[in-house]
Image (tube, rainbow, N blue to C red):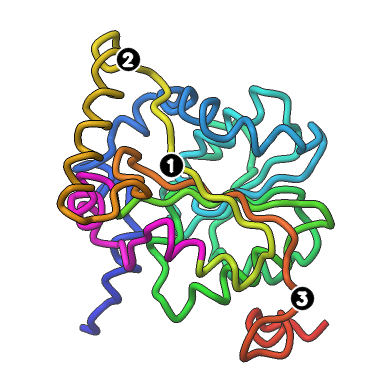
Amino acid sequence: MSVRNLQRALLERYSETQVRHANSAAYADARGAWPYYETNYARALAGIPRDGRILELGCGPGNLLAWLRNNGWTHVEGVDASPGDVAIANEQLGAPLVIFGDALDHLSAHPGSFDLVIAKAVIEHIPKDRLLPLVAATAAALKPGGCAVIDVPNMDWLLASHERYMDLTHEVGFTRESLASLLSLAFTDVAIDGSQLAIQTRSQRLLRPLLIRTLRRTLYVLGEGASDLLFSSRSLIAVARSPLPEFPGSETFGSLTGRSD
């Protein structure tokens, strides 16, 4: 019996393995993450027309796509490497809007096609040698004036170690600096912010700012540069615009994405 690739084996049964142990709520309550999307994505989506074409990479059970449709975006679609998640997403959406496949292959097959490409909790699962081709293909898949939203776990977060290793399919972690370095190879306009809590209790609203200021001052005294550290945000959200036509060390997008056009 041949030894199967661990990543592939986990993805084939992602909802039964990783999700069952770490994120079952996302599958049990399709609307549970909608406040997060509203709080953290609304600004990037403000310029996307309701009839614009939106692609989500690694869409899981389709919760973000469902939120987009609920808010009036009519041309949404997804691609995911887990056949189980594809089936769950299409059942939730009530239409075959999500296909099973590889994100890089799908992007490379659709140059200049999308007003928006979203990758939430995706690129941390990509091996380093595939990151630049994926980012390049994302940039090449955008229409003129389009943008990409990249949402990843924040390795400067206080509980970043747990976030990094809670999922066996994670390949890499990002800080604001390293994410900016990667995206700047494909885009000229990259803005990165820390995610915001969508729902806060009264105690969080009152005490959280004080605790953050106190911890920031403490780390500053320790010399850890906390004045510019996003340790209070669980995720980093990048909005990337204005794709570069070329990359250092490569002639064109095609050399990275497999495209010859």
Marks 1 and 3, how far apart in space? 28 Å
Q: Position of residue 91 (x, y in %)?
A: 52, 34
Which numbered marker is on residue 245? Answer: 3
Checking the image for residue 194, the label placed there is: 1
Question: Could you say which quadrant of the image residue 217 lies in?
Answer: top left
Name the residue tied to disc 2: 205
Please name the amino acid that badge 3 sits on.
Pro
- Is there a contact, CB below 8 Å, between mark 2 and mark 3? no
Quarter location, residue 104 = bottom right
Q: Position of residue 73 (x, y in %)?
A: 73, 31
Q: Is residue 7 visible?
A: yes
Location of residue 38 (image quadrant): top right
Please tell me how many numbered marks the rendered image carries.
Answer: 3
Taking the spot 79% from the left edge, 31% from the top edge, the residue there is: 50
Q: What amino acid is found at the position of numbered circle 1 in the picture? A: Gly
Placement of 231 over or under 210, stated as above or below? below
Compared to residue 257, the image places residue 227 above or below, namely above
Give the SS element for disc 3: loop
